[in-house]
Image: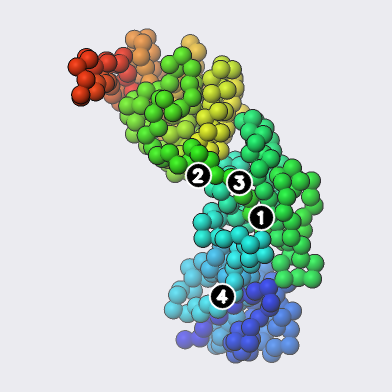
Amino acid sequence: MFSLMLIGVGCQGLTAQQTGMLTRCRLIIGDTRHLPLVKGMAAEQLPISPLTRALASIRQALASGDVGVLASGDPLFFGIGRMLLKEFGADQLVVFPALSTMQEACARFKLPWDDMKIISLHGRKTLHAPGLLLGSEKTFVFTDQHNTPAHLAQQLIEYLELIEDEALLAQCRVHVAENMGETDERLFSGTIAEAATQDFAELNVLIVTRPPLAGEDLPMFGLSETEITHSRGLITKDEVRAVTMHALRLPNTGVFWDLGAGSGSISVAAARLHPSLTVFAVDQHPEAFANVRKNIRQFGCYNIIPIQGEATAVLNDLPDPDRVFIGGSGGKLSAIIGQVAKRLPAEGRMVVNGVIGQTVAEAPQCMTDHGLKVELTRVQIERMIFSEIEPGKVLNPITVMTGRK
């Protein structure tokens, strides 16, 4: 069986070993940057784009000889290696990696990368880039012609201004490595504001760094009412929050609406448990909106997007949700449930917490009328301290109502 040799090209070009392996090939596939490296070889040379044609050529050539594929850095690190493994199997594939683009960039900026978060926006759409870029103290990003460093920096500016985090806006740093290994290589380091005004070369990678946050050291789940900023006792109580999160069965990725967010305690719990989930915290009251923004800053929940407005007026502008929690409705519960039910996907869920009898009666019937299967859980909480003689504190009973398709 002939071999498919996947060659990683580093900033210094091909090694002697890699060149020797390629001289055995009858076909070499690569992009326009890499094919000049093998110009003098006898093998037939074809561009890797369009990919469908390249894969067909590889399959045909492997029947009678070895084939080489040139790729940047480590081809198994966000590269073409995954696809070639799927198409041709591990037994036929031989990999000769170079240093990855991330390793090269981190070496240039002298940044340790063992604790760095890695995301790829290359050829991908993202709903809320700041939630990805600010989720860790150091984030490495594969960019593309749409998700450019300048464009991403502008999104960071707009989001940090929305949550009123001027300190983080000033303290974050952006590092961009352009055209690594080429004669026109350029390294940029600066503030987010400085990066937003730059014109970067198309071939680049991005690193965003931010300072650590005190709130990040707190438990991932189990924040108490005393730790979360709220007003006038308007917060989902600790024990009820746990039951609500269980009822929601949140996905790791997707969209979560927290309507009538109040303090944003449910949003914070969801955002911390599922960092890749995009959370929209909606509330019409300025006081609640301010509390949500403060909790985002305190706990580093940058995957929460706060929205001030009445729910029925803003929902049409939001992407379809995978899960929805209704903590407050401003007297428009029926209308909100109707809007939500129309937007939920096949496996979607809606959870409504009710204290007053009218909500407990209205919500299940309304969800049922819109074709949802409804389950009710009534929660009665009594708090007491074992060593104290004082009687326990009994909280108002809460009915957790879950509607699912």
User: In front of the other: label 2 or label 3?
Assistant: 3
Tell me the number on the disc at residue 97.
Answer: 4
Tell me the number on the disc at residue 131.
Answer: none
Answer with the quarter of the image where residue 22 lies.
bottom right
Q: Disc 4 and disc 2: Cα gap in Å? A: 30 Å
Observer-nearest of 296 and 399: 296
Residue 104 coordinates in the image, percent (x, y): 64, 67
Tell me the number on the disc at residue 276.
Answer: 2
Image vertical order of residue 19 relative to residue 233, above or below: below
Q: Earlier in the sequence, mark 1 or mark 2?
A: 1
Q: Residues within 10 Å of mark 3 (few under 14, many from 20)?
A: some
Q: Amino acid at mark 4?
A: Pro
Quadrant placement of the C terminus: top left
- Name the residue at 55% across, 60% down: 113
Q: Disc 1 and disc 4: Cα gap in Å? A: 22 Å
User: In front of the other: label 1 or label 2?
Assistant: 1
Secondary-structure class at tag 2? loop
Observer-nearest of 281 and 40: 281
Observer-nearest of 177 and 142: 177
Query: Mark 1 highlights which residue?
Result: 206
User: In front of the other: label 3 or label 1?
Assistant: 3
Q: Is residue 389 visible?
A: yes
- Name the residue at 64% across, 75% down: 9
Q: Amino acid at mark 3?
A: Arg
Q: Disc 1 and disc 2: Cα gap in Å? A: 19 Å
Query: Mark 3 highlights which residue?
Result: 210
Position of residue 167 in the picture relative to residue 363 (left or right): right
